[in-house]
Amino acid sequence: METIVNILSTRYITHNVKQFRLQKPAGFSFTPGQATELSVNRPGWKDKKNPFTFTSLTDDPYLEFTIKIYPDSDEGVTNQLSKLAVGDELILRDAWGAIEYKGPGYFIAGGAGITPFIAILRYLNKQGKLAGNKLFFSNKTDKDIILADELKSMLGPEAVFLISGQKDSVHDTRRIDETFLKAEVSDFTKHFYVCGPDAMVEQINSILARLGASADLVVFER
Ligand SMILES: Cc1cc2nc3c(=O)[nH]c(=O)nc-3n(C[C@H](O)[C@H](O)[C@H](O)COP(=O)(O)OP(=O)(O)OC[C@H]3O[C@@H](n4cnc5c(N)ncnc54)[C@H](O)[C@@H]3O)c2cc1C
């Protein structure tokens, strides 16, 4: 089903990630980790449907999305989204499963691949059920880390930030490879949730398979 919803607020939460809060239609529901396809309700854009993940809590009175903007892409939906303001309209569709929490384990995210985990971790935090979960969150530079403070305040030392492209980073600069996982994972029988760019998800999945673990994967393309 398609519903037209208004933008209630927008704000940049990093230099290139914008949070959008939208009207929540009565009765609309989703589970943490699910996504939907959004379009901009303007001529020429209505049929461009791109997937984005809900980051609000299921009982928040609004719907929230956390979206990395690609300003270099004139034909791109996120560039168009970045130009919208309060009161502008989006087309919202039904929620569908991307990734689902099945029990304590390891969350491994790259860049905007953190979004399904924001939803799940916020939900678990609210229920007081975060124990036993650990996050490895990889980004190019320190300033790319989405919601670093919130993730640290929820998970404390169980939120580990990894930086791949900044030598003077204040964070861990190791790559998430086999050596890293062998050093950092104490239990390969726990759940693994992996979300990020294609190459990262593929690589981590094959390492986990070699190490005897199985993972739930979401590919965020490129
Ligand atoms: C299930 C799911 C959930 C998602 N949830 C989120 C979310 O919550 N937040 C979020 O930020 N993202 C999310 N994504 C990713 C998001 O859908 C895409 O990043 C977004 O649709 C890109 O839109 P765009 O039209 O602006 O970008 P595009 O026009 O596709 O461009 C994106 C980037 O790729 C480059 N590019 C374009 N075409 C090519 C090409 N042929 N070869 C190489 N590079 C190219 C562009 O220059 C630009 O830098 C999700 C994806 C999936 C599958």
Image (cartoon, rainbow, N blue to C red):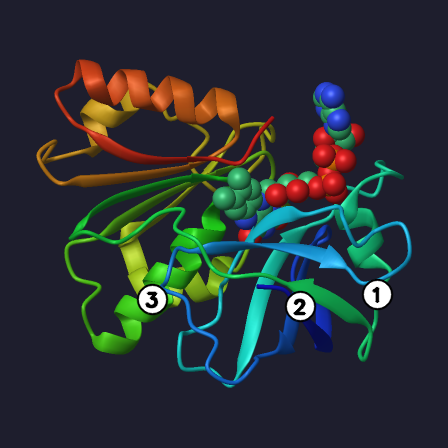
Alpha carbon distance from label 2 to label 3? 22 Å
Q: Is residue 151 left or right of residue 183?
A: right
Q: Position of residue 193 (x, y in %)?
A: 30, 41
Alpha carbon distance from label 1 to label 3? 31 Å
Q: Is residue 123 above or below residue 96?
A: below
Residue named by callout 3: 154
Residue named by callout 2: 20
Q: Earlier in the sequence, mark 1 or mark 3?
A: 1
- Rendered image quadrant of residue 206: top left
Q: Are marks 2 and 1 in contact (CB under 8 Å)?
A: yes
Residue named by callout 1: 84
Q: Give the quadrant of the C terminus.
A: top right
Q: Kindly state the secondary structure of the residue where label 3 is placed.
A: helix
Q: Is residue 55 left or right of residue 211?
A: right
Mark 3 residue type: Met
Question: Would you say residue 112 is visible in this rendering?
Answer: no
Ligand 1 within 8 Å, label 1 CB: no
Q: Is residue 44 above or below residue 172?
A: below
Q: Nearer the viewer, residue 147 or 36?
A: 36
Which mark identifies residue 193?
none
Alpha carbon distance from label 2 to label 1? 10 Å
Q: Nearer the viewer, residue 222 or 177?
A: 222
- Rendered image quadrant of residue 33: bottom left
Q: Kindly state the secondary structure of the residue where label 2 is placed.
A: strand
Residue located at (33% from left, 62% from top): 121
